[in-house]
Structures are given as structure tokens and as C-alpha cells.
Image (tube, grey):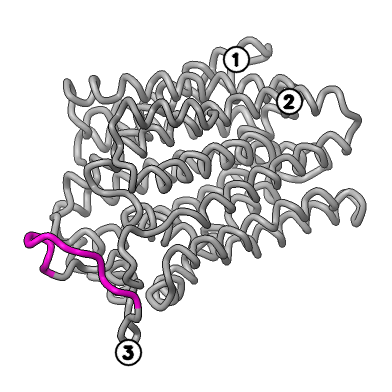
Amino acid sequence: MHLAMLTKLFRQTAVPIEYRSNFLHLYFDIGWFGVLSGSAINFLNIYAIRIGATGFQIGLIGAMSAVVSLFLAIPAGRWLQTQQIGKAIFWTAVFYRLGFLSFVFLPRLFDEQGQIWAIIAITFLMAIPLTPLGVGFNALFAEAVPSDYRAHVAGIRNVVLSIAFVAMSLISGYLLEHIAFPVGYQVVFGIGFFGAAMSSLHLLFVKPLSTEPLTRSGNEATDPAPPSNAAEDKPQPNPIKRMASSLSTLRLDIWRTPFRNVLLGLFGYHLAQYLALPVFPLYNVHILKLNDNHIGVGTALFYLTVLFGSTRLSRIVQRLGHKKVTGLGVAGMALYPFLLALSDQVWHYYFVSLLGGFIWALAGGAFANYMLEHIPPDDRPSHLAWYSIILNMAVLIGSLGGPAIAGEMGLSGALMLFALLRLLSGLGILKWG
């Protein structure tokens, strides 16, 4: 999206001039992240499979971030309390995204098995700065965007991400088909790193509206506090501090409240989701024999319908509510692995991608609000801390368990089983969530 287009959008929505710089850099941040996602992130597993990665190794690549997050989330939260949030997010983004540059040089440094294990090791190291980046970005967003504009900015970011992702998926697939292996992948990884670097650069210019640091850590802040309205004179709790405190003092009493069923339902949803994710690229490469251009087109079609479904989400939620949309969306996600397991032509894959993207837009867009509806507004950090734990557990178990099950049952049989699990988890949310 060009600067002139964004400027026109600002004028149309009457965004106050003092907010425009932050908004603009947040849009460019996510746009360049879409370039990274549609290139390096999108094709990393495919590259690993093409050089001989097993299902277990693909699972390890997906599991690394969950392993690190389970161990480092609490220290990361405490560390962020002592930092200026803008600088902390910029530098963690830089160190995380430097890892993508290393992928460019792997074919020059190692044989095929050496490259696979190097990818696993690099992914593990990248997860260390990714943990505070994931914890802290929401806090930076909250401090850089006034509450009245957050839905507006988040909505535009979703659109920009989808457009960039779709375009880059198509471009990457085309490049990989027309440039000799493995040089084509080196080019795609290089493009991804450039997108990562540009995204990080724009994060540097996102400034909290308040000049007060996250915590005083025993020393009084030297920067003056911004003017406040009378209604805002009461000190507001710091989101990073509250989350770190909640993670370090996990409250077991939450499991004796109705929120327990929400946690169990979402655990089932994420587990069924992540069991299948590492199996999809294995099936696409080994069974469907898709080339990189096919995969790029399929991914683009998936995110095109995600974008379309997202525009319809609000209307559907108004009619059915977040719980029903989440449950029906999760149950509907069973169609993707079920139909994929029955596919044997590339057009089948394209059709499954179109259908799967629309259904994912419903489930992925509604589940967070469904969860928040069941959390007391004054006790969100403690509840979200438990959600963070069950999410990472589902990612870890699913990423390693999915390929293991596929090794025992075969790829098609595993996809059928995962489809059944998705259907049951959706029905469970509808009945007990």
C-alpha cells in the first residue's frame, strides 16, 4: 500500500495529526511483515521437506517457539517491565528477524541433513527474542494507539497483511519455479529477510503516546508525564507488569470457575489445529506432488478468502454470537484436512484452500472475543496467562504429535483423524463452552 493511499485514508477517517505517524508506521510494519510471511515463513517448511526433512523434524521446527515460550514467558515479562517498551520491541524484533538472513546461506554451508538441523537450531534461537516480542507488542500497540482507534488500526493492519501476504505468495511461487534449486529458495529467503528488516525499521518509529517508561524500577522517571484528563488521573495498571505478575502467580482457582470449560474447549481447538499443521506440507509435497508455484497459488487463495471472510465476520457474529461462530468455525475447519485427504489433483487443493480460508476467518476471528466474553474485565491477566499456557502446550504437543501419528497411520489416515478431532472440538465448544 503506497504512502499516497494511506494519506488519503487518513483524511477520510479524520485521524488526528498527532496519531498519524504511529498509525502509518504500524501499517508499514505489518505490510513488510506480510512480505516476510508470504516468502520465507511460508516456504521454510516446504524447503526443509524438499531437502529430506522427516515429519519429526518438521514438527520440531514448529515446536521450538512453544518450548521456549513455556520457559521464558515469565522472565521475558519481568525483563520488559524494566525497559522502554518501544526500544525493547525494536531490538527483540531485530534479533528475532536476523535469523531469516542465516537461511540464505545454509545451502553454502551444510549438506542437506546439516541444513535441516541448522534450521531447527536457528528456529530455537530465534524463539528466544520472539518470546518478549510476542509478549510486548500488544503493550506497545496499546500505548501507541488510543483506545478509540484500535479497532480501526487493527482492521487496516489485517487488510494490509492479507494483501501483502497474497501478493508475496504468488511472487515467491513464481520465482521458485523459474530459478534453479536451491538458488530460488535463497532468493525467497533473502526477500523475506528484507521484509523483516523493513518491518523492524518501522517499529523503531512507533512511539508510545505516553513518555513515561514502563516502570520506574526504583528511580523516578526523568521525562515529564503527558497532560491527563481528570477521568484519567487514577493510575492505570501496566499491562506488561500485570501479565508478568499473573504468570508468576498462576491462580488455580480459575479452574474452578466456568472459564475452565472455555480453556478446555480452546485447548481442544488448538490441539486439533496444530496436530494437522505440520502434516499439511508433507501431504502436499509427497502425495499431491505440488510444485512451489501450486503452493504459492493455494496459499494466496486461502488468504484471499480469509480477507473476504473477515469482512463478513461482524455481520455473522451479530446474528449468532461469538460462541456459536467459534464453535461452528472450529467444526467447519474439519473440512480442510478431510477434503485434502481425498484430493489427488491440484484443482482439488485450490478448492480446499478457498473453502478453508473462509472457515478459518470465522474461527480465527471469533475465538478471542468468545474467550474475552467469559473473562471478568478486572481480572484479564490471570485468565490470559492460563490461556497462554494451554496454547503453547497445544502447539508443542500438536507439532510433535501430528507427524508421529502420521508416521503410524499414514498421511491420509492422520488427516482424517485430525478432521474428526476438529469436528469434535467444535461441537464441544458449542455444547459445553
Q: Secondary structure at mark 1?
A: helix
Horizontal side, residue 222 vs residue 233: left or right: right
Marks 2 & 1, CB-CB < 8 Å contact = no
Q: Secondary structure at mark 3?
A: loop
- Quadrant (top left, top right, bottom left, bottom right) of the C terminus: top left
Q: Amino acid at mark 3?
A: Gly
Q: Which residue is mark 3?
A: 218
- At a point 50% along the width and 63% down the height, the residue shown is 131
In this view, the residue in front, 97 or 259, is: 97
Going from the N terminus, do you reach mark 2 or mark 1 first?
2
Q: Is residue 45 visible?
A: no
Counting from the top left corner in percent of width and height, residue 119 is at 74, 54
Residue placed farthest to the left in the image? Answer: 230
Residue 135, picture quadrant:
bottom left
Q: Amino acid at mark 1?
A: Tyr
Circle 2 Cα neighbour tier, 10 Å, few/some/many (<14 / 14–19 / ≥20): many
Q: Is residue 42 visible?
A: yes
- At a point 70% along the width and 37% down the height, the residue shown is 43
Q: Say which mark, if any, is on residue 350.
A: 1
Circle 3 Cα neighbour tier, 10 Å, few/some/many (<14 / 14–19 / ≥20): few
226 up-or-down from 4: above or below: below
205 up-or-down from 433: above or below: below
Q: What span is colored magenta in the figure?
A: 223-234
- At a point 29% along the width and 74% down the height, the residue shown is 224
Residue placed farthest to the bottom in the image? Answer: 218
Horizontal side, residue 184 vs residue 153: left or right: right
Q: Say which mark, if any, is on residue 33.
A: none
Counting from the top left corner in percent of width and height, residue 276 is at 54, 37
Going from the N terminus, do you reach mark 3 or mark 1 first?
3
Q: Which residue is mark 2?
A: 173
